[in-house]
Every structure is written in structure tokens, then in C-alpha cells.
């Protein structure tokens, strides 16, 4: 059975899934800092192995970003991504403040995936834009053999 658990992945768990989906990797120390600064995180766990992660970063009250939504390719299209995003939306609903915004930079083919949770294209800032710093095409610290998608944000 696959459980959605409200916890941060370890840096090793995170890096393993980043490599599995072929996103750009990060320095191990950077992953540890990033994960420790996460506001909400969930892991999808099967027999004690993390097969999916998703997290929300932000200022804790007004502005948040849904990011690093990743399910191992072997487990995709089985509703795990949906369950993780639903769980994180539940975490957001516990916040007592008004006019909170949760953003996501959706890959074009995943726009409908996010619309199912109530995300809508922003009238204020179409399209989503990103700027990279110290960009590297290495998929991870250890070679995964998978090319990084050109606009992957993980
Ligand atoms: C995107 C991702 C997190 C979705 O997780 P998942 O567990 O596979 O998704 P679900 O099974 O909950 O999908 C629910 C629905 O979303 C849509 N969907 C999911 N993945 C999709 C994809 N790659 N392309 C188009 N539609 C997709 C489908 O409508 C799907 O329903 P269906 O399987 O009945 O057709 C997963 O495919 C993944 O890790 N991809 C690689 C990393 C990535 O791109 N992350 C998102 C960055 S914005």
C-alpha cells in the first residue's frame, strides 16, 4: 500500500527521485538547505521506500510555491501525484490568513493536471517565467543517464 506521509524527504531520498525523473541535480548541501527551509512537504511511501515527493516553499503567510512534485516513473499515472498535491492543499487550508496565493510553474503538458486542484492561469503574470543561476546540465551529482528537461524546476 502506498501512503502519503506529511514529512520532508531526506536529501538522499530527494536526490534519488530527482535523478529518477531526470531533473537537474543540485549540490547535496544545497538540497539539505532547501529541504530544511520547506514549509510543507509530503512523501509517498511504499514499503518504507519513498517513491514520490512534493513540497511547498514560501514566506509562511502570504506567498507560496508548489514545487518538486515528482513521482518515480515506475509509479506514475497511479494517482500518487494527485494524492500528494491534495495533501499539500490540505496543509495550505490550515493557514488562518486571507488572500494567500499558491503558485506553480506548470510544464505545458501538465496544465490540466494542476487545473484539477483549482489552479488557474494567472491574469497578472502570463506566462510563468524563470531565471536560472549557475545552471548546469548535469542531471545529478551521480550520472543518471537522463537528460534534464529544458524547463524542469526541480
Ligand atoms: C507530474 C507527476 C508528478 C504526476 O504524478 P502522477 O502520480 O503520475 O499523476 P496522477 O496519476 O495523479 O495523474 C492524474 C492525472 O493527471 C494527468 N497527468 C498526469 N501526468 C501527466 C502527464 N505526464 N502528461 C499529461 N497528463 C498527465 C492525467 O490526466 C492523469 O490522469 P490519467 O492517468 O487517468 O490520465 C509525475 O508524472 C512526475 O513525477 N513527472 C515527472 C516530474 C514532473 O514533471 N513534475 C512536475 C513538474 S511541473
Image (cartoon, rainbow, N blue to C red):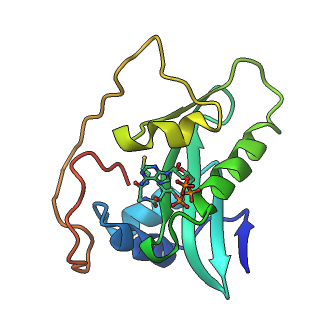
Q: Nearer the viewer, residue 87 or 6?
A: 87
Q: In the displayed structure, would residue 118 be above or below residue 57?
A: above
Please provide percent x and percent y for residue 120. 55, 24
Q: Nearer the viewer, residue 43 or 134?
A: 43
Is residue 134 shown left or right of residue 91?
left
Q: Nearer the viewer, residue 8 or 78?
A: 78
Q: In the displayed structure, would residue 56 be above or below residue 29?
A: above
Residue in the picture at 78% in, 24% down: 97
Q: In the displayed structure, would residue 33 be above or below residue 64?
A: below
Residue in the picture at 34% in, 72% down: 19
Please provide percent x and percent y for residue 89. 71, 42
Asked whether the viewer can see residue 65, the reply is no
Q: In the rendered image, which quarter is residue 52 located in?
A: bottom right
Asked whether the viewer can see residue 53, the reply is yes
Please provide percent x and percent y for residue 39. 64, 48
Residue in the picture at 64% in, 50% down: 85
Amino acid at each position: 500500500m502506498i501512503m502519503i506521509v506529511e514529512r520532508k524527504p531526506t536529501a538522499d531520498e530527494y536526490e534519488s527521485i530527482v535523478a529518477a525523473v531526470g531533473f537537474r541535480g543540485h549540490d547535496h548541501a544545497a538540497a539539505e538547505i532547501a529541504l530544511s527551509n520547506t514549509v510543507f512537504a509530503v512523501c509517498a511511501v511504499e514499503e518504507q521506500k519513498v517513491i514520490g515527493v512534493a513540497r511547498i516553499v514560501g514566506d509562511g503567510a502570504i506567498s507560496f510555491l508548489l514545487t518538486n512534485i515528482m513521482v518515480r516513473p515506475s509509479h506514475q499515472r497511479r494517482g500518487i501525484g494527485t494524492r500528494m498535491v491534495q495533501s499539500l492543499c490540505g496543509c495550505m487550508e490550515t493557514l488562518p490568513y486571507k488572500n494567500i496565493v499558491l503558485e506553480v510553474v506548470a510544464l505545458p503538458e501538465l496544465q490540466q493536471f494542476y487545473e484539477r486542484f483549482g489552479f488557474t492561469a494567472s491574469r497578472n503574470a502570463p506566462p510563468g517565467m524563470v531565471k536560472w543561476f549557475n545552471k548546469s546540465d548535469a542531471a545529478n551529482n551521480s550520472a543518471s543517464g537522463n537528460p534534464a528537461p529544458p524547463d524542469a524546476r526541480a
